[in-house]
Amino acid sequence: MPAKIPWLPSILPPNARPERCPNCGRLAFIAWTLRRDDRTKVVLRTWVCTECQVTQERPEPE
């Protein structure tokens, strides 16, 4: 397993609503940060797995 990235969470925060990770299959995939795409102006949320550190961006409703 690769080393964990320090700026990503390594434990589930209290009151988190984790989903199943598409990479490792554990119930540890949580919503993390928001950003707005400069070109399209769409709001995107970065999701991260606290176990394997994989990230995924998903559109966020405004």
Image (cartoon, helix red, strand yellow):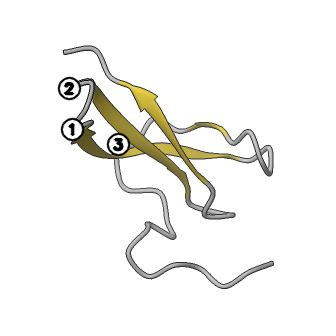
Task: Give the crowd class for mark 2: few <14, some 14-19, many >=20 residues within 10 Å.
Answer: few
Left or right of 36? Residue 10 is: right
* Residue on which the image places disc 3: 15
* Residue on which the image places disc 2: 41
14 or 42, which lies in front? 42
Amino acid carrying mark 1 in the image: Asp
Q: CA distance from mark 2 to mark 1?
A: 5 Å
Residue 30 higher or lower than 12, as above or below: above
Check residue 60 in the rendering and tell me which mark sits there, or answer none.
none
Q: CA distance from mark 2 to mark 3?
A: 29 Å
Residue at image position (74%, 80%) is: 2
28 or 57, which lies in front? 57
Question: Given this view, does label 3 or label 1 mark the residue nearer the observer?
Answer: 1
Amino acid carrying mark 2 in the image: Lys
> Pointer 2 and pointer 1: residues touching (CB < 8 Å)?
yes
* Residue on which the image places disc 1: 38
Q: Secondary structure at mark 2?
A: loop
Residue at image position (57%, 44%) is: 29
Residue 58 higher or lower than 16, as above or below: above
For marks 3 and 1 on the same chain, the one whose residue lies earlier in the sequence: 3
Residue at image position (81%, 78%) is: 1
